[in-house]
Amino acid sequence: MDWSLTPTQARFLAELRAFLDTAIDRPFSARPYGASEEAEWERARALHRALAARGRYAPAFPRELGGADLGPIETALVDAELAARRVPDVGRIPAVGYFGPTIQRWGTPAQIARHVGAIGRAEVVWCQGFSEPAAGSDLAALQARAVRDGDGWRINGRKVWTSDALHAGWCYLLARTDPQAPRHRGVSAFLVPMDAPGIEVRPLVNVADAPAFAEVTFDDVFAPADALLGEAGRGWYVATTTLDLERVSLSRWAAVLRDLEDAATWLRHRPIGRGRTTDRLALADAFISANVARVLAARVNDRHARGELVGSEASVAKLLSSELGQRVAHLLAGLGGLPALAHADGAPVPGTGEAVTSTVPWTIAGGTSEVQRNIIAQRGIGLPRS
Ligand SMILES: Cc1cc2nc3c(=O)[nH]c(=O)nc-3n(C[C@H](O)[C@H](O)[C@H](O)COP(=O)(O)OP(=O)(O)OC[C@H]3O[C@@H](n4cnc5c(N)ncnc54)[C@H](O)[C@@H]3O)c2cc1C
């Protein structure tokens, strides 16, 4: 099996790298998965807009929707290149990787032109209103309600852990429209502007002390008829598209590999020794796992590009890279010792201390490791449901 880039993809990558070399005039201070300060948020969004102007923000989108008519491989190349340069994601991967494609799959032509186009041109940040206080892993337990009101809907409910809600212009949410139906039916998907009257956003500070997500309440929010995505009562199918693509998008091998390469450079140049044998072996081990994660992600992207179902393999890729990210963060913190944990200069890689806390949610967001293992057990090796 040959996963090397085609000449066109290699040219795409070379051009992308050349552009980023000049567009990023100084390193981003925030880690890609950590606390993005406001100024860094704006800087990253400006870079996204510059990429969009070249069809490089969402390259798999059609040209008329801001893309470049390319495919998932090119999207993955952009993901990896931005992660390797520690550009804070600021909502790009969810929007490009799964919100936009979900709207493309289920939206009306008018919804696609309006929303997917705005995503492809990096004009708007979206947030995902799925999880609720009593509906996380068990998403079908969701309680938010939407009832008919004339041509439109009235939405009431409470969502939690809503990433990027503070910056979002729009929310893609799930609400129950038929409480009598079995719980996977009777759910509908809606696209709602965050400035609609009745929406309140309360920031939640994460373990890395950053307001990366929020609690969002919907108090009699009116959603017009064209807010409904897909058919009423069929929102579970819409959500499944999103969740499958989310797992495809969440392999973070590039950020991990970059940290490992920087740590190796740091050890090579450290005046006080080249590291203990156990650290050297642990680093070598992590390099092996990061490269396995890279190959797995390539395989998932390759199958996705061919239009094949990626199923449990996306869960394997997500699980491996998220658990590896935590392992590497602890390894580097151990290498750098107290100065690294205290965020001081001289840490093996920028933000070593912060990485220990910032990688904690990697195994929760997008479905916990236990949920991924359940998917692998059922869909991957055919075990019966527990
Ligand atoms: C950083 C971050 C960002 C997030 N962003 C968003 C967002 O933008 N939008 C959104 O809707 N949600 C978001 N979430 C929420 C995320 O999807 C949920 O946290 C996740 O699905 C887990 O749900 P929960 O927190 O309710 O935990 P629970 O589902 O209550 O799980 C608690 C524990 O029980 C385990 N468990 C649960 N069910 C099973 C089972 N069947 N088998 C084995 N173990 C099980 C879990 O693995 C976990 O360890 C985010 C979460 C984080 C951490």
Image: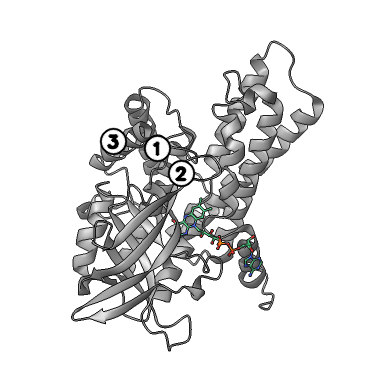
Nearest to the observer: residue 304 or residue 181: 181
Which numbered dot is residue 5?
A: 2
| Residue 85 quadrant | top left
Q: Residue at x 32, y 80 (%)?
A: 232
**Mark 1 vs mark 3: in front:** 3
* Chain-order first, disc 2 or disc 1: 2
Question: Which residue ends up furthest to the bottom in the rendered image?
Answer: 180
Q: CA distance from mark 2 to mark 3?
A: 28 Å
| Circle nearer the N terminus (1, 3) | 1
- Mark nearest the camera among 2 and 1 is 1
The answer for how far apart the CA atoms under marks 1 and 3 are is: 20 Å
Q: Which mark is residue 237?
A: none
Residue position marked by numbered label 3 in the rendering: 46
Point 23% across, 62% down: residue: 197
Q: Nearer the viewer, residue 174 or 65?
A: 174
Residue 123 visible somewhere in the drawing: yes
Q: Which residue is labeled 1 in the image?
A: 13
